[in-house]
Image (cartoon, rainbow, N blue to C red):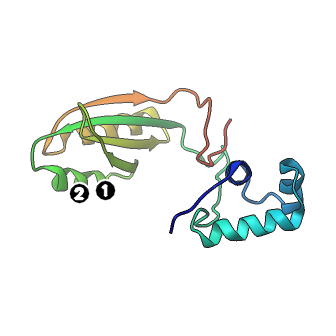
Amino acid sequence: MDVKFDEKDRALLMLLRENARAPVAELARKLGLARTTVQARIERLENQGAIAGYTLRAGSATEPALRASVLVSIEPRSGPAVLTRLRALEGVETVHTTSGRFDLLVQVTAPTTADLDETLDRIGEARGVKSSESLIHLATKLDRTGRALP
């Protein structure tokens, strides 16, 4: 399905990313549209697949203390074995394949520096991993994914 969004659709989606539970009347006020128009837009965006669902945004009390992005280079044909190892590590949240110098981008969380260090060691020791580089997240300045900012 070819989905077309106008500026009001994009603004509505941004508001829903910030707070998916915002009342339709509040969204309408912010967008300068009638409440029924906003409700109809939401239903159309849901039907078109632009809105796949609504989710819980965890508060800062439930967020892990530490986050890191780990750039990983792997040996040829070792992807499945490395991915199996990464799946087994509790602190690994997401794994993305990448283009460029590194093969994988691994998002890691941990409650303490000791736990983070342990997870990073386990990633580096995985059979098939040539090298890794860790980037510890310090402060979040912008987040449009729905996580609560401090």
Name the residue located 57 percent from the left edge and 67 percent from the top edge.
Answer: 49
Q: Nearer the viewer, residue 126 or 46?
A: 46
Task: Place residue 76 in its image quadrant.
Answer: top left
Q: Is residue 140 left or right of residue 29?
A: left
Identify the residue position indicated by label 2 in the image: 84
The image shows residue 11 at horizontal and vertical percentages of 72, 48
Q: Please give left or right for residue 84 compared with residue 33 in the image.
A: left
Residues packed near mark 1 inside 10 Å, few (<14), some (14 to 19) or many (20 plus):
some
The residue closer to the viewer here, 122 or 40, is 40
Determine the residue positioned at 58% across, 45% down.
63
Q: Are marks 2 and 1 in contact (CB under 8 Å)?
A: yes
What amino acid type should be assigned to the residue bearing mark 1?
Answer: Arg
| Residue that mark 1 sits on | 87
Q: Position of residue 10 (x, y in %)?
A: 67, 50
Which mark, by number, is residue 3? none
> Tag 2: residue type?
Thr
Q: Quadrant of residue 141?
A: top right
Residue 147 horizontal/vertical position (percent) = 62, 46
In front of the other: 143 or 8: 8
In the displayed structure, 73 sits above or below 83; it is: above
Q: How many marks?
A: 2
Label 2 to label 1, Cα distance in Å?
Answer: 5 Å
Image quarter in which the C terminus is found: top right
Q: Residue at x 40, y 43 (%)?
A: 107
